[in-house]
Image (spheres, helix red, strand yellow):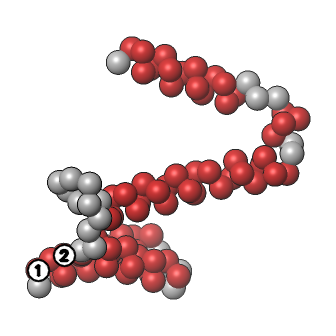
Amino acid sequence: MLGAGVGCYLLKLAGLSVPARVLANPVIARVAELIPVALLAALVAVQVLAAPEGRALVVDARAAALGVAVLLLLARAPFLVVVFGAAASAALLRLL
């Protein structure tokens, strides 16, 4: 546990010690902006499509709830409406 903590601290320190001239490069700045979006999308995909037991992909109520959330986001619904709409659609599908 202590080793993981030290590793995380060193990784954070490495990111903070990058010279400003490197971050001033437009390509590097754009990539740095897009990395969190890609990581979040990957986490969502794994949580939605991964089977609870094993290494299989599953399309179930979670995938439909993600679709509802995307549609609500495209309609520019407030965040709470998106969350509750996706949760309600997953609950209704599981009920059926």
Q: Residues within 10 Å of mark 1 (few under 14, many from 20)?
A: few
Q: Amino acid at mark 2?
A: Ala
Please say if the residues under marks 1 and 2 sit with CB atoms less than 8 Å apart.
yes
Q: Position of residue 13 (x, y in %)?
A: 64, 23
Residue at the farthest front position: 55
Q: State whether residue 34 is above or below residue 18.
A: below
Q: Residue at x 19, y 81 (%)?
A: 93
Instruction: Quickly name the residue at label 1.
Output: 95
Q: Position of residue 35 (x, y in %)?
A: 62, 51
Q: Residue at x 45, y 70 (%)?
A: 79
Q: Position of residue 24 (x, y in %)?
A: 86, 42
Q: Quadrant of the N terminus?
A: top left
Q: State whether residue 93 is above or below residue 43.
A: below
Q: Residue at x 52, y 52 (%)?
A: 39
Front residue of 63/50: it is 50
The numbered dot on residue 91 is 2
The numbered dot on residue 2 is none
Residue 51 shows in the view: yes
Q: Position of residue 58 (x, y in %)?
A: 26, 68
